[in-house]
Amino acid sequence: MLQTIISRLLASTKGILAADESSKTIQKRFDKIGLQSTPETNLAYRKMLFTTPGVEEFLSGVILYDETIRQEIDGVPVPQYLEKRGILPGIKVDQGIVDEITTGLDGLSERLTEYRNLGAKFAKWRAVIVANQEDAFIEKNAENLAKYASLCQEQDIVPIVEPEVLMDGDHDLQKCQEVTAKTLKTVFAKLVGQGVVLEGVILKPNMVISGKDAPNKASPKEIAEATVKTFLEVVPTQVPGIVFLSGGQTPDEATENLAAINKIGGPWQLSFSYGRALQDEALKAWAGKEENVEAAQKAFFDRCKKVSLARQGKL
Ligand code: 5MM
C-alpha cells in the first residue's frame, strides 16, 4: 500500500502542490492581494487551483490543510474530488512551531485515523531550521519528525518528512550546505532509531542554496551541484524520492534550479512539492475576483507545466 502511493506520488512527469497553508500563512499570502482569509475565500482560492483543467498531467498529489480536507467542491468532498482527477490527497498534520520546535504529536494517532477515513493517502510534517540553529533544537525537531513518520507508517499513510533549512539570512552556499548536511544526518539517524522504513518515506528538503540576502548568489548549476553532492553524502539510497520545497525562491528560480538538479540526477526520484513557486503567479492573477479565474488557472497551468518539465531535466 505505502509503495503504491509512493510510486504514484513520484511519477516521473509529476510533483506535489503544497496547498496546506495554515490560517495565519494563507492570510499572509492574501495580504498581497488585499483579501480577508475566511473559510469561504480560502475555498474559492483553492477551488480555482484544484479545478484547473489539465493540471492532473503535472500534479501527483496535493497537500491539504485541516480546514480544506473537510470542505467540498461542487458537492464533492475535496479529497474525493482530487482522487477523481487522479491526484492523491495528503494532509499537513503538524500544528505549528512553539519555541523553535514543531508540535503536533499529542493525539496524532487519532487524527491520522480520522484523516485516513476522510481520504488522506499521505501526510506532511515540517520542521524549521535556521542557519545558526543550535544542535539541541535540530535533534528535538528530528526526533519529532521520526515519531510522526513512524505513526504514519503504522496506519499505511506515507509520511513526507520535511526538515526545512530556511533561506532567511545572508549566509552563503557553503553555510547552507553545512547546516543541511547536519540536519539531514540527524533526521536519518532518528528515523532509523525509531524503526521507520526508509523505503516508505518521501523527503521534502530545501535545496542547498544561498541565503536570501547573500551578497553573491550561487547559480543554478552551483546550487544543483552542491545539492546533489550533499544529498549523496547524507540521504540513504533506500529513500525512494526527494521532493524539494521552494522556500521563497521565485517561480523561475525554483523551476531553473530543479531542472539543473535533474540534469545531474541521483539514485532517488528528484521532484517537487512547491507551495509559493507554483501558486504565486496564479494568486496575483486571481486577486480574489471570480472574473479572473480563467486567467489565474492559465497562470497556474503554465507554471505547473514548466516545473514538470524541470522535474524531467527538460528545461
Ligand atoms: C504551503 O505552506 C506550507 C504550510 O506552511 P505553514 O504551516 O507555515 O502555514 C509549507 O509547509 C510548505 O508546504 C513548504 O514550506 C513548501 O512551500 P514553499 O512555499 O516553501 O515551496
Image (spheres, rainbow, N blue to C red):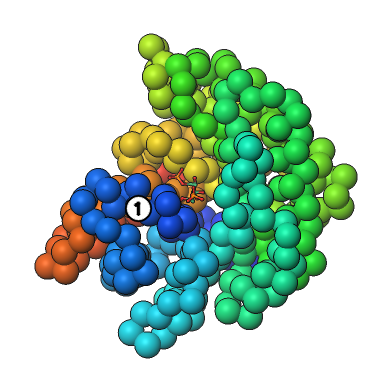
For the C terminus, the image quarter is: top left
Residue drawn at point x = 64 percent, y = 20 percent? 178
- Please provide percent x and percent y for residue 181: 67, 27
For the N terminus, the image quarter is: bottom right
| Mark 1 surroundings: few (<14), some (14-19) or many (≥20) residues within 10 A | some
Please tell me how many numbered marks the rendered image carries: 1
Q: Can you tell which quarter of the image residue 9 is in? A: bottom right
Instruction: Give the labeled residue for mark 1.
Output: 27
Q: Residue furthest bottom?
A: 75
Three-letter amino acid code of the residue under disc 1: Gln
Q: Secondary structure at mark 1?
A: helix
Q: Is residue 1 visible?
A: no
Q: Is residue 8 visible?
A: yes
In the image, 12 versus 283, the foreground residue is 283
Q: Residue furthest front?
A: 99
Residue drawn at point x = 87 percent, y = 45 percent? 193
Residue 23 sits above or below residue 155 on the image: above
Q: Can you tell which quarter of the image residue 48 is in? A: bottom left
- Please provide percent x and percent y for residue 23: 43, 57
Residue drawn at point x = 59 percent, y = 55 percent? 95
Residue drawn at point x = 45 percent, y = 82 percent? 77
In the image, 204 versus 31, the foreground residue is 31
Q: Residue furthest top?
A: 215
